[in-house]
Image (cartoon, grey):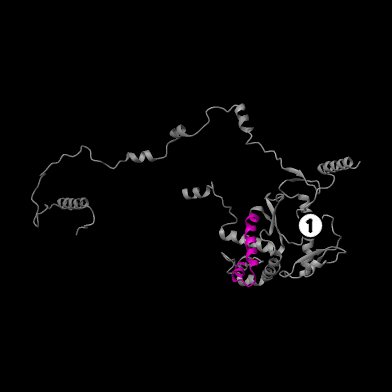
Amino acid sequence: VWLLVAAAISYGRVHRQLGLGPCSRLDLLRDLMTALVRHERIEAPWARADKMWVYVERLIDYVKLGDTNERAMRIADFWLTVSFFPAPLSSPCGPGAGAEHAALQEKDLIYKLFKVLASQFQPHPGSYTHLLQIPNRHGLDHAKMAVIELKGNPFLLLICPCHDTEKTLLNQLLKGYREDTQQAAAP
Amino acid sequence: ALVVVFSPLPRLRGLLQRCWGRLERGFLPGFSGGQSPPWGPALAVQAPACLPQPVDDAGESNEAPSLLDSILWMAAPKKRRTIEVNRCRRRNPSKLIKVKRNIDVCPECGNLKQKHVLCGYCYAKVKAETRLIRIEIHKKEGGPFNAPTVETVVLYDGEKPTEEDEGKRIVERARKRPSWFVQN
């Protein structure tokens, strides 16, 4: 009884619990990563997105090493091959059981990873993703949601770097000052 | 045969038990064969007046305390909480809803937004447009698992692909470019 009570008290536990357990957590992260590589812009609960972007950036770092690298191939294989349709036989941990099923389905994504994304992110040394918060999920559970996107995606910008217009107070004051100095300097 | 592992005390106890058994059956210890002669007490030892008995009283103290006892150690309020004390507790700042100071006006559309969160209206706009673009991509790809091995560029009505869009796959959208669209 006391072991259960000790397990329930979570004072001081820093790690987030995603999903049912470690295997389920890895599956969740893998699903999200595959979806991101396929669609390049993903809406997900903020906690999952927050955990996910680290894995994505490490994956892209490995992928940048090249197509021929054995290690990069194995890592991409693990993190991307996922059976899109929920198969009736579920593999308990890791994609080992569903590998034959999945290897056919997500092969195009591996090509896309190594050819498109590697060349796209070659000049950048570091961050390849944007993580932005969205208003809470409407209606169901008001969960804190976030948007992850890869930086070179073909869609619209979520944050527009807009320059201040001329009508702002500061710009009007500066404009007036400039005109005053010109008038003082002219005659 | 005796078990030699233990301390001498059980050995003595075993010996005593066997002697007692023999006495009960009527033999003298050390008397081999024959009937036992009538015997009486050879040695009298002082023993405590009452031998230690298995205590039956210990069980009574372990039973669940009766209702009369439980009244004595259950928690209960002693006095009625006055309305002043109640007010202090209910209106304590930790219990009131906090006022949010991080709400601003979105410069693009004028709706309210939180400072660290994207504007809901603008994001809904972007999401709708992204959905339409994705429909076009889906139409172009045809099947479910045909991700291309080249980048993608979105072009609107009346736009031609520039020089940097050479090797990319082009996705056409049949409307004019919205004013707020900035290509990534």
> x%, y% of residue B100?
70, 40
Chain at numbered mark 1: B
Q: Is residue A82 visible?
A: no
> x%, y% of residue A174?
83, 43
In the image, is residue B69 above or below residue B164? above
Tell me which residue sits at (8%, 50%) in the image.
B37
- Quadrant where the image shows the C terminus of chain B: bottom right
Q: Is residue A26 magenta?
A: no
- Residue range in magenta is A48-75
> x%, y% of residue B32?
9, 57
Tell me which residue sits at (53%, 49%) in the image.
A8
Q: Main secondary structure of the magenta part?
A: helix
> x%, y% of residue A116?
71, 68
Q: Is residue A2 visible?
A: yes
**Residue type, numbered disc 1:** Ala
| Mark 1, residue position | B128
